[in-house]
Amino acid sequence: MEKRDWLQFISSHIKSQISLDITRKAQAWALALLGFFALGSALHAGAEVSSRPFLYGTKVLFLVLFHFVAILAGYLPNILQKGEKPAARLLGVRDFTTLTAVSLVCGFYLLVNFSLSSQLVKDLEDMRLSNFFGFAVWLNYGVALTYLLLGAFDLLSYSFFTQALVKTVEKFKKWPQVMTGVHMVLILSLGFAYTELEPVGSARFFEQLNIAGLFWTFILSMVFFLGKLLYASPLKTLTDLELEVISDRLHRGEDVLQRFKDASINRRLAFWIGRLSHHVASRSHEIAENTHEAVALIDHEKPSEVDLRKVEDRYKKAESIFKKFERENQKYLLAATCFDLNEEERDKIEKLRDLFSRELRNAKIELASVRKRIDERLLSIRNAQTQLPAPEQPAQQKLSLPQS
C-alpha cells in the first residue's frame, strides 16, 4: 500500500473509533443516570413504607433476585460459553486495573448480600414464621457466608498464598454447575417461603418487587458503568500513528501494519505487561548476582568461616527471591485468565508467559548447580581438614625429686 492508501485506511479507522468512543461514553453516562434514578426511586418508595413485614418481604425478594442474577449473569454464560470468558466481556475486564475495580465493587455487593441475609436470620424469631421459612433463610445465610469467606480467601490467597488459590481453582472445575444448582434451590425455597408473607400477584407483592428491582437496577448499572468508564480507547495511538505516517517517519508498509496492530492493544494492559517484563529481568538479575557472589566466595583457595557463612547467606537470599518469583508468576497467570483479550493482546500475554517460564527454569537450574558446587566444595574442605596431621604434643620433662 502507498502512503495515501495508508492514510485513508488509518483515517477511516479513526473516524470509526471516534463514533465508538462517543457511543460508549453515552452508554456509560446513561447507565449512571439510570442507576441513580433507580436508587432515588427505591429510597423514595422505601421511605414511604414503615411496615416491618413489608421491608422484610422486600429483603426476601431482593435475595431471590440476587440468585437470579448470579445464575443469568454469572454461572450460566460460563457453562454455555465455556472458555470464552463471557463475564469478562460483559463487564469490560481487559486489564488488571479494571479487574481490581470490578472485583472490589462485586465484593462490596457480596458484603451487602451477607448483611441482608444476616438481618433475615436475626428477625426470623420475631416474624414467627414456619420451619420451612426458617430453613430457606438459614440456607440462604449459609450460601451468603460461603461467598463472603471465598471472597476473603481469594483476596488473601492472591496476596500471600497464591499456590493455594491455584490448587483450589484446579480442584473445583465443576463449580459453575454446582452453584447453579444451589442458586436454583434457593430461588425455589425462598420463593415458596415468601408466599407465607404475601401472596404472589398481590399489590404488596408488586410494590416489594418494584423496590427490590430498582435496587438491583442501580447495582447492575453501576457495575456496567464502571467497566465502560475504565475502557481504554486506542484513539490516541491511532492519531499518533497517522501523524508519523504524514511526517514520513514510517516508510515501510510492514512497520505501519505492525503499529496499527499494536494500536488495538489496551494501553493499560501494555503498560502492565511492560512493567512485569522489566520485573522478570530484575528478578533474574538478582538471583544471578547472589549465586555468582556465592560461587566467588566458595572458590577461594582457603575460604574463612566468615566467607562460608556469606556463601550460605547469598544462596538462601537467591532461593528466597526465586520463591517470590514463582508466586509472582502464579499471580500473573491467574490475573491473565480473567481478561477478555483480542488476538494481539493474547500474543503479548503468551510472550510474557513464555518469558516467565524460561527465566524460572533457568533460575531453577542455576540454583541447583550452585547448590551442588557449594556442597562439593564444602565436602572437599572437610576432607582436607581431616587429613591434616595432628599437632605434636610437647615432650613432658620428668622432674627428679631431691632425695633426703
Image (spheres, helix red, strand yellow):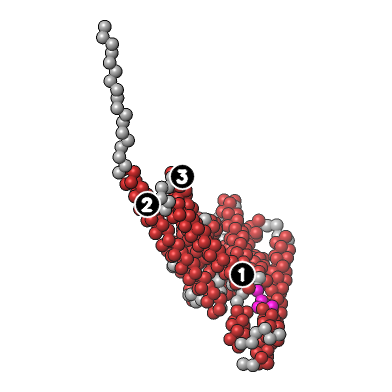
Q: Which residue is at the front of the view, 228 or 51?
A: 228
Name the amino acid, label 1: Phe
Real-space Cα distance between discs 2 and 3?
15 Å
Q: Residues within 10 Å of mark 2 (few under 14, many from 20)?
A: some
Outermost left residue: 403
Task: Relative to 230, say whether 403 is above or below.
Answer: above
Q: Which residue is pictured at 50% across the width and 62% down the height?
A: 284
| Residue 348 appears anywhere in the view | yes
Name the amino acid, label 2: Arg
- How far across and down, in percent of the image, does residue 116 sit? 60, 57
Label of residue 306 in the image: 3
Q: Is residue 234 magenta?
A: yes
Q: Which residue is at the front of the view, 64 or 1?
A: 1
Which residue is labeled 1 in the image? Answer: 271
Q: Which residue is pictured at 67% across the width and 71% down the height?
A: 229
- How far across and down, in percent of the image, does residue 194 sit? 57, 62
Name the amino acid, label 3: Val
Quarter occupied by the N terminus = bottom right
Question: In the rendered structure, are the residues bearing label 2 and label 3 in contact, judged by CB atoms less than 8 Å apart?
Answer: no
Label of residue 377 in the image: 2
